[in-house]
Amino acid sequence: MNTVLNRREFIKKTSAAAMATMGMGAPLAGLLTSCERGKIPSTADSVILLFMAGGMAHTETFDPKKYTPFRKGMESKEVLSTFPSIPTALDGVHFSEGLESIAGVMDKGTLIRSYVAADLGHILHTRHQYHFHTCYEPPQSVVVPHLGSWISKELGPLNPVIPSFINIGQRFSVGEGEELKAFHSAGFLGSEHGPFLIPDPSAGLDSVRPPIGMSTKRFESRNRLYHDLISASSMGEFGSDYQKESLKRSMEQAYILLNSPEAKAFDLSLEPKESYDKYNTGKFGLGCLLAKRLVNQGARYITVTSEYEPFMGWDTHDNGHTRLKDMKKLIDSPIAQLIKDLDQSGKLDRTLVIVASEFSRDMLTEGRPGLKVKDQVEVPDKIDDLKNYGMHRHFTDGCSMLMFGGGIKSGYVYGKTADERPCKSIEKPIKIDRIHQTVYHALGIDPETNYEIEQRPFYTTPDGHGKVEFDLLKS
Amino acid sequence: MQESGFWLWELVGRLHPLIVHFPIALIVVAAVLELFTFGRFNSKIRPGIFMLAAIGAVSALLAAPMGWLLASNEGTSGEILELHKWIGISTAVLSVILLAFLPFGKRELKAFQIKGFRLTLFITAIGVSLAGHFGGALTHGENFLTEVLPQSKDENSIESTPINLATYQEELTPEKEMKLIGEVRMVLAHNCYKCHSGAKIEGDLRLDEKEFVFQGGESGQILIPGKPEESDLVRRINLNKNHDDVMPSKGKLLNAEERELIALWVEKGAPWPDGAAQQSVFRVAELAPRNPSLPPGNSEMKNPIDLWVNEYFQKNKLDWKTVVDDKTYLKRIYLDVNGLLPSPKELEEFENDPNPQKREIWLQKLLNRSDDYATHWLSFWNDALRNDYTGTGYITNGRFAISDWLYTSLRDNKPYNQFVKELLNPTEKSKGFIEGIKWRGTVNASQRTEMQAAQNVGQVILGLNLKCASCHDSFISDWKLDEAYAFANIFADSTLEISRCEVPTGKMAKTEILWEELGSIDSTGSKAEKLRQLANQLVQPANGRMYRTIVNRVWKQMMGRGIVEPVDEMDNEPWSQDLLDWLAFNFVENGYDLKDLIFQIASSKIYQSQSIGYASADEVLADDYQFEGMVQKRLTAEQFSDAVSEIIFPLFSEEEVKYDPYELKSPEVSVPTFARASLVANNPFLTALGRPNREIVSTSRDTQGSLLQALELTNGERLNTVLQKGSEKWLNEVLTPEQITRELYLEALNRSPNEQELAIALKALGEKPNAAQIQDLFWAVILLPEFQVIE
C-alpha cells in the first residue's frame, strides 16, 4: 500500500513541483489552464459528417479483400470483394476500385477499419442510424439529442447568422420517414438546437432568403412594419415576459440571417463553374459543396447524407456490384474535392470531416458472426445472375470510417479486419461512444457534459462512459 | 472521558425516571377522582383522594432533586431540559402547598379549604403532566407523542426541515443521532448518489448504505470518525471549485451549511444508528386524499379556489391584482376551453350582455360546445398519452392509435376515473397507451413495452418518475428496481425477469401496485385479470395522488404553471398544499368531472385576475416561486394555427386531416370551416411551433421562440402561401385601408388599433392596397408578441 502513490498524494507532490517551477518564472497561465476543470484545448471548430446511409460494405470500399470477378455458377462463399483493389496515397493501403480520388487524399487523414456497430436484434437501418447519430440505443425514455444538437448546445453557432446544426440531403417523406424524425431532434436540449433541414442542397438558398416572390425591398419594409407595430403597441397590457422577448429576439435573428451577406453561402449558383462541376455528381456531391461553402462562413456542425430511403442508395439488397459502381461515382470526387478545398483554404486544420455508415455489408453473414439474426435477403449458394453478385446482407462487426482534419492524425490506419470471411474487426475494435467522445474532445467539449433531465443526469455518451480514442488524434 | 461523580449520587439520579411515575400517576388520578366529587364537599371517596395526593406530592418532592442530580451527572442540557426542569421544580413547590391543605388527623376541611385544595390539585396535575411530557421528550425524542398523530405520520420525510446545526452541538441522544444521520444522508442523496450509489459507482465508492460509506472507495477510507480534519470526505467537499479533487466534481458544490453538517457528523464520531435506512431522504407526498376545511368566505368571494388563494396571499403578504376586462376574459376562456379566438361579433355580444352572471354563463356555453372542446383538449391528451396519427412504430404494427377512443371520451366528458380505467384495462380502441411502442429487434430491458407501460402510467397518471428505478434502484426517490418491476409485471403476459442496468439478475419480478395501501394484485391472474384489478385499485378515491396529479395538470393548462412543478413530479412541494388537496378532493366528490373542474377554475376570481409576465422561464420554475396569479401563456402550435386559419385562410387542407371526428357527427353539430390543427398529421410547421414528436410522453411544451421557428414563420412556404391567399380574399371584399386595419385588429387582437398603429398600417397599405401589402400587414400582426401570448 505504502509504496504506491495514491492519486491524492501524487497530486500533492506534483503541485509542490509546480509551485517550484512557478517560483522559477515558468509561464503562469499555462499552469492555470491545465488545472482548470472542464477546459479542454480544442483542435476543431467545425464538424462535417458525410453519411453513407443504408450500409456501406467495407470490403467494397475502404477495406477491400480478395477480388473474385463475376462468373456464372460461382459459389457465393468465394466472394469477398467484387472489385479489384487500387493503391492509395498511403503505402500498402488499398481501396476498392472506383475510389481513386479519395485514395489520393488519404495521406491527409485517418482510415478506421474496425468500427463495430451495435447489436440491436434485427439489424435495421433506422435504429442503427439513431444509435449512430445519438450514441443511444433506441428507444429511450426521453427524446435524445442528436450529436449535432449537443455540439450546438455546448458551442453555439460559430457565426451567429449560420444555424449551428445543419442537415443536408435527407427528405422525411420517404419510407421510414417517421423513424428518421425520431433522432433528427434536439430533444430535451430545446428546439433551438434542432437541425436546420436542407433536403435539397441546390434549393438551400430558399431556406435562407426572403419568401419566394418577395423582393428584398419588400422584405425589408415588411420587417420595418413589424417593428413599428411592436413599438406602437405596448408589449400587451400586462407587460413583457420572457416568451414575448424570445419571440422578438428570434424574429430579429431570422431577419438578420435572411438578409445577411453570409446567406449567399447557401447559393450554389455563385460557385465557380469549374469547382461546381467537380462536386456535381448529384445531390450528395452538391451537399458536399454546400457544406464546404457553409463551413467557410462559419457553420458549426453539418451532416451531408447520401439520403436514406429503403432499398435505395447504399441499401443494396440486390445488384450490389452494379449499384456500388454508381455509389462510388456519387461520392468519390466530391469527398476528395472537399478535403482538398478545405486543405487548400487552411480550413481543414480546424474542421473535422468524417465519412461513415451505420453498418457494413457482407454477402453471407447477417449481423455478426456467432449471432444469428434474421436474414434480410435470400442468397443462393451458387450465383448465376449478376443481380446476386454483391454484398446484400447487413454486417456489423467490421465497418470502415474515414476522418480528416480537426486534430486527427494524417496518413494513419486504425484497426484491422480479417482477410477471410467473416471479415470482422480483429484489431482495435471501436464503438460509437468512443467515436462520439473523440469528436467532442476534438471540439473541446468536456467528456462529462450532462444535463439533468427528469432529475437524472443525461450525458453526451451513455452514463458519461465514452472514452476518448487518443490514438486517432495528433499528439 | 469526564470525571465521574460519587456513585451513590449517580444511582440516586438514575432513579429519577422510576420515582417520577408516582407523582405523575397518583396526582393525576387524584385530580380525576376529585372531578367526581363536584357538588359534594363531603364525598366518601375524599379520604382516598387525600391519600393519593399525599403520596404523589411526597414523591414529587423526592423526584425533583433526583432529576437535578441526573441532569448534572449525565451532562444533559438544552431547551427541553430547561422546560422540564422548571416545570418540575414548580410542581414540587405546588406539592408542598398541596400537602399543606391535607387534613392530617381528624381535622375537617372547610368549604374554602376544599376549594383551595381542588385548585392546587388541578394545577399540580397539569404541571406534573407537562413535566412528564417533556421528560418523555428528553428520553424518547421531541416528537415522541406527536409523531404518531395522523397528520404528522407521513411527514417522516425530513426534507422540509432546514438544517439546524446548533441542536447537534451538545451530546447526541439516540434521537438526535437518528435525525443527524437523516440529514447527512439527505445531503449525500441529493448531491452524491448520482455517481456514488447502486445506480452508478464511480471511484468504487458508494454512499447510499452504511457499510459502503465506512468501507470507502478506491482511494481508501473516506472518513475517520471523530476526525473531520483527517477525513477525505470533509476535505474534498471543502475544496475550491477548480481543484482536481473537489467533490461533487459535477454540478453544484455543497453549501456552507451542508459542508458544516458533514464535518460535524464526522466530528461526532459519524454515528449511523441502525434503522437509519428506514428514514426517507426524499420528500414523499401523501397518497391519501385530504379534505382541508375551507377558510371562511364572504360575499365577494365564494369560489373555494379564491378562498384558498386569498389565504395564501394573506400569509405571503401578496395583493390581489385587478380583474381583467371582458375582452381579455373572453379571449382566455375561448382559447383555454375550445382553443379558438372569439369572433368580433361574439366579443361584441359578450360585452353588451347585461347579465351580471355572464362570465359563468358564457363559460358554460363554451364548455357545452363538446366537439370544439374535445378538438382542443385532444392535443393536450395526445401529447400526454403519446398518441399520434403518424410516427414511429405504425409502419410495423408496433403501435396503436387511440384517437377515436380519446376524442369520444373527451367529447362525452367521460368521468376521469372511468377514463383511466379504460386506459389501464383497455378495449381494442384504447389499448395503444399501455401497449406502448414496440420497436423491431431487441430493446433495452428498461424499454420493454411492459416497462414503458409502468413508466408512462407512473408519469402521466400518477405524477411519478419510475424511469430511474426501471434500470436500478432510484437515486432520485425511494423507489427500488424490484418495485418498478413488480409494477411492470402487472402489464406482462408472463412473469418478467428483473434486469439491473441491462444485466439479467435471475430474479423474477413480483406483482404489486406501488403502494400497498391501494390493495394487491393476484399474481397468478391472467394479464386481463391483473389489468382489471389494477384499474379498479388505482382509480379508488383512496388514491389521492392520482387525483392531485390530474387537477394539477388542468390547473397548469389554465393558469400557466402547476401548483406542483414539474407536473410529473408530484412528490415536489406544492405552493399550496391546501388548494391542491381541496381541488383533488372536490374533483372526486363532483364525480370526476373534468369540465366541472375547468369551470371551477375559469370562474374563479384568480383566473379572472391580471396575468403575470416573468423575465425568464427559470423564475417560473424556481424553488422559491411564489404564486401571484396566472402566468402568461404562449399560444400553442394548434391555437396559433387555428387562429390563422380562422382569421386569414385555412392553413391545412382537408387531405391533411388524419382524424375526422365529424364523420360521426350528429346533424346539429356545426362543422368548423377549416381543418383544425389538432386533427392533422404532424408537419414541419407544427413541429417548428412546438408540437412534439409523440414517441414519448410529453406534458409541457417549449414556449420560447427559436431561430428555426422564426425562420419557418418568416419565410416558410406554408404560412406565406396562406397569407397570400387570405390577402387575395380580403382584396376581393373591397374594403378601405382603414377598414382592413380595424377589422384585422379586431379579429386578431380583439381590440381597435390605436392612432399610432392605425397610422403605421395605413402608411404600409397605401391608398389603394394590393394583395402584397395586405399580406404583409397580416404577417406583421400575427407575429406580434401580443397576438402570440395569452395575457
Image (cartoon, helix red, strand yellow):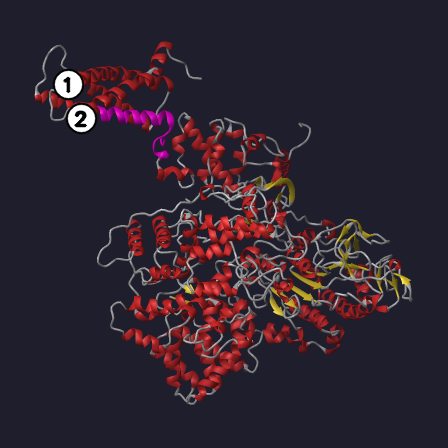
Q: Which residue is drawn at 35% across and 40% down?
A: B151
Label 2 or label 1, whichever comes before in sequence order: 2
> Which region is colored magenta?
B122-148
Q: Nearer the viewer, mark 2 or mark 1?
A: 1
Quarter-of-image position of residue A96: bottom right
Q: Nearer the viewer, residue B560 or B359?
A: B359
Q: Which of B706 and B349 is in front in this view?
A: B349
Horizontal side of B513 relative to A195 (left or right) equals left
The chain carrying label 1 is: B
Q: Which residue is drawn at 49% across and 43% down?
A: B520
Marks 2/1: CA distance?
13 Å
Question: The C terminus of chain B appears in which quarter of the rendering?
Answer: bottom left
Quarter-of-image position of residue B301: bottom left
Q: Where is residue B396 in the image (x, y as percent from the top left)?
A: 65, 62
Q: Where is residue A163 in the image (x, y as percent from the top left)?
A: 59, 66
Type of amino acid under label 1: Lys
Asked if the stretch drawn in magenta spans residue B141, the answer is yes
Quarter-of-image position of residue B65: top left
Q: Which mark is residue B35?
A: 2
Q: Where is residue B518 in the image (x, y as percent from the top left)?
A: 45, 44
Question: The N terminus of chain B appears in which quarter of the rendering?
Answer: top left
Q: Which mark is residue B44?
A: 1
Q: From what the image shows, is residue B275 above or below residue B789? A: above
Q: Position of residue B64 (x, y in %)?
A: 27, 18
Type of amino acid under label 2: Leu
